[in-house]
Image: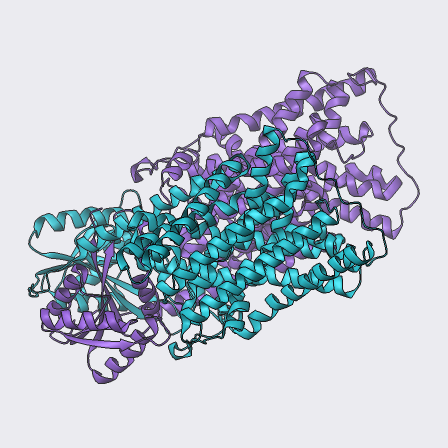
Chain colours: A purple, B cyan
Amino acid sequence: MRLKHLLIGHPLHAIQAEAEQVSVFIGLGAFASDAVSSVAYATEEMLLVLVLAGSAVSFGPAIAALIATVLLLVISSYYQTVHAYPTGGGAYNVARENLGVYPSLVAGAALVVDYVLTVAVSVAAGIAAVTSAVPDLYPHRVALALGAVTILTPVNLRGVRESGRLFALPTYLFIACVLWAVGAGLVHLFAAGTAASGAPLPPVPAVPTEAISAAGAWLLVRAFASGCVALTGVEAIANTVPAFKEPAPRHAGVALIWLGVILASLFAGITFLTFELGIRPRPDETVLSQIGTSVFGHGLPYALLQFSTALILLLAANTCYTGFPRMASLLGRDKFLPRQLAHVGDRLVFSNGVIILGAAAALLLVIFQADTHALIPLYAVGVFLAFTISQIGMVVHWRRARGPWWQWRAALNGVGALATGVVLIVVASAKFIHGAWVVLVIIPLLVWFFVTIHRHYDDVEWQLKISPDAPLRGLSHTVVVPIPGITRPVFNALQYARSLSPRVQAVYVSLDDEETRQVQALWNQWNPGVELVVLEAPYRAIVGPLLEYLNIVEQEHRDDLITVVLPEFVPHRWWHHFLHNQTALLLKGALLFRKNVVVIDVPYHLNL
Amino acid sequence: MRLKHLLIGHPLHAIQAEAEQVSVFIGLGAFASDAVSSVAYATEEMLLVLVLAGSAVSFGPAIAALIATVLLLVISSYYQTVHAYPTGGGAYNVARENLGVYPSLVAGAALVVDYVLTVAVSVAAGIAAVTSAVPDLYPHRVALALGAVTILTPVNLRGVRESGRLFALPTYLFIACVLWAVGAGLVHLFAAGTAASGAPLPPVPAVPTEAISAAGAWLLVRAFASGCVALTGVEAIANTVPAFKEPAPRHAGVALIWLGVILASLFAGITFLTFELGIRPRPDETVLSQIGTSVFGHGLPYALLQFSTALILLLAANTCYTGFPRMASLLGRDKFLPRQLAHVGDRLVFSNGVIILGAAAALLLVIFQADTHALIPLYAVGVFLAFTISQIGMVVHWRRARGPWWQWRAALNGVGALATGVVLIVVASAKFIHGAWVVLVIIPLLVWFFVTIHRHYDDVEWQLKISPDAPLRGLSHTVVVPIPGITRPVFNALQYARSLSPRVQAVYVSLDDEETRQVQALWNQWNPGVELVVLEAPYRAIVGPLLEYLNIVEQEHRDDLITVVLPEFVPHRWWHHFLHNQTALLLKGALLFRKNVVVIDVPYHLNL
């Protein structure tokens, strides 16, 4: 307990749970880290596939433009969601309200998977930014990634006060650094034709003129699918509308538009520079780091770029520690996950969700050896599945809610749904063998899990239901008191038993004939007015004979409720327990699983 | 439970505990394995010190003769003990009866240490016999030793029917093999001057004529101390007198004399051959194995010698699995060790003692890397401490009991006590820095441990004592029923509470204002005739507010006994527990440590 308080902090009073409402500028910075940080790896993932295509590599900018188009569509769709669901328009809520239970569970499962993957991918990419700058750390990347998760988890159990100002800083720092690098790169490219480091820029690869093969075309599709990870995280603002200053939907909408503009610019800039500088992916250095060194050299600006990259990625991982437990608590509240996930802990956070997220992300990081490229194929499927369900839900929403221009709004969300749906199919098929199949197996399993849990809760609720007009009836008791001898706790227990019913039986299990005779003699001398029954224990276990005797008592007193009163002495110090038989504990355990028997613990506290 | 039955077997009925009574021949074989097996390493341990003394090595036979003399004294002393204590004359019993509590505890501690060391030393030496014959196994000796303990422990939890015939066989096989080797060796030495293997025997070292230095003399003392391990185990027959056929003391006495004769012959024979053959200790081959190869070569007789050596050593370890738990049960019965050690388990063995012995021996084998030579310095101290206390106890016994020739008997035990006492001092000082200090620290610690436990049991007994003429009084109850809502288990719990007392309060801890209003409305509608108290939970923990409320109830109803009735529903399958809050369990835990509160569990069993 003390250790817990040291690590996690003392319990917080409910009154300490106050929400801070933020401006567009702060809100964009605080909630967009997940989305913005994905440009740190999106171009590289695209490039990794394109280099396999040989000369087709020059299609890169065209693919990036296509991805940016999808991005703008998704942003417009969410702009509408933000206004339609001012209390928070997550895919789970929207689907539940408009499409029914099963689609919402699919969206919920997709989001659960996404949050875990976002932590794993962001941490892996953040560590890659660090090891790019300090190559000596490269062999220790798994340990570093686990270290990051090990720090994030208790920090979030403590509960991070979502200080918008503090959280916005790394996002803007990263945006500034990337824009600086892109700007400097462009200036050098067009003005001098050489990089800042003084080395001549590599030649721009020639645009191929010949037609590309079918295999090449498939690689282009795969490159598109990989690049789509740039879109991950854009739903964050739609989930957190109430955190904006009033009028919240308006402010959240403006933030969303700015997010689209920033994301598109950063992605376009990084992609353009990558291709213009002829950068190729390397296992030990990220593409963004290569841009940095080729534009800035190895000085302070480069270090700042890498630092801000690592920082925003860790912040993106950190936001999942708010998002996942909140998602899990919604599922718990709706009885699709264990209800404990819906309970706010000591520190006003959904502690169980935080722990589960940390454990799952750590597991993924170990399995995939903290390798971003290995994790990416699992990533985009869940994201686009949630997008698509959410947009379809919005179409249904407009059909129901109507209002001005509703057909246009429905059409916009419909086009969004179509686009993300197509991307979903492309991503799922293009990356199926590379890992997407894992997610396509896990999501249905999660849905089945949700439904099974829900059914259990419904069953239990039905069984526990009471018609609230039933009156309390009187009960007739037969009481059995197992005794280990004639002691003070036994005295108290018998007294208690007698206050409950005149039908009390003391039961002594005989392990030694001589002791049994002594107990019987003492009992007769004492004569407490209670019958003493002696049971034989041929196998020297006490619990067995007692349970058998209870069967007999039950048959003899069919109309009575059977109660077992356990005389128990509680040692003064916990380790004294080791010096005493745990018969009472064993009996309690055995009786818990026996129907129609009530157990009474009459404790007797020792003084030393 | 099923796993336990598979490994350990089904429980045995008390009637299956029948003792087998054995003849002198069988008894000697069955109970002497510990004593006889020590000749497998005693000579080697002596030699290991002597080789450090250079030319003084030729004093070996003289030291061996001195050890044999001590052996005969100890045997004669125990011959008297066997007749004086026909129900078993272990050092603990004899000391307790004649010298009082503290000396008996010292003897008990010494024996506890001895049993653990006997297992460790015997297993290590047994594995050494195997690895001498199969050198490829030498690097795996620690794993092999742990494997042996891992087999012995569950076998003894199952309970080895002490089949005398079966247990006597390995002892006589070993005796026969050693006698054969010694006989063959002597024949070759005197008749042909060459070993059976055809190789010429090494020259007999010349007896030194010059005086030896002080350092050399100290080495001779240390060699004597090391050789004294040959005496370990001779007390076994005195401990097991009742197992012999009637008249038991007579038969046990005869067995003891035979043991002395056999032990002395084997030790003398092995030592003589070792020195005549010029054998020197080697880390990877035991001295006995070297005698075997040099007399028999590498054929079948040699294999048989090594096999029988390993077998008798493992059997010696096995006898401790009977002796240690019996010793621990005596200490447990007398309340010097946790009472659980005095309980006979399912399989009619003192299971807890078996487990503790196995764990302690395994620990020693790992710490000392299954190296006999490293373990030996710890060994003899405890043995000779127990011998000495036992003989002193016998002297007191004769002074009290008198009888014919009592002065002579007392004198014989007195000489025995003096001899073993001197050996004890020699062993303790000669091996102090080599490891004996460990035992000299542990034995007083154990005694302190015994005394502390005893004091605790006495305290508890005193506190639990009841004057058996006190009548049972009536009780006045106030009952508190914590409720999670209005459900069937709550209905049952309230009904139970009302049957106990008219003063019942239902307590609801409010975590959510809306839910609380619903519960209150339902309660008013139901109107069960019980007051509903709503508590606030600012820290969202349920247990804290309930405990605080109990304080208030206690102050309001000072004359009443407070009872908490817990409505608890029991899921159909154990893993369903994970889907429900363990509030009842937490409450039970918290209330166990609260004085003057009785807890009643009213379980409600779900059907699916």
Report the side of B370 relative to B249 (left or right): right
x 54%, y 42%: residue: B225
Q: Is residue A306 left or right of residue B410?
A: right
Using the rendered view, name the quadrant where residue B397 is placed: bottom left
**Residue B500 visible, this angle:** yes
Question: In the image, is residue A284 above or below residue A355?
Answer: above
Image quarter where the N terminus of chain A lies is: top left
Q: Is residue B508 above or below residue A140?
A: below
The percent position of residue A161, horizontal first and vertical second, equals 42, 33
Q: Is residue B236 above or below residue A136?
A: below
- Residue under the image location 69 percent in, 21 percent down: A302
User: Is residue B363 placed above or below A440 in the rendered structure?
Assistant: above
Image check: B321 left or right of B548? right
User: Where's residue A577, x and y in %?
Assistant: 32, 53
Residue at position x 70%, y 52% in the image? B273
Q: What x and y, as percent, mark residue A226?
A: 72, 44
Image quadrant assignment for residue A170: top right
Residue at the right extreme? A210
Residue A97 visible, this orientation: no
Quarter of the image for residue A199 reads: top right
Choose between B343 and A394: the one closer to the eye: B343
Q: For this view, does A362 lie left or right of residue B204?
A: left
Q: How many marks?
A: 0
Locate residue B603, reporting x and y percent: 29, 68
**A62 vs B556, nearest the viewer:** B556
Q: Nearer the viewer, residue A5 or B286?
A: B286
Depth check: give the residue in front, A273 or A84. A273
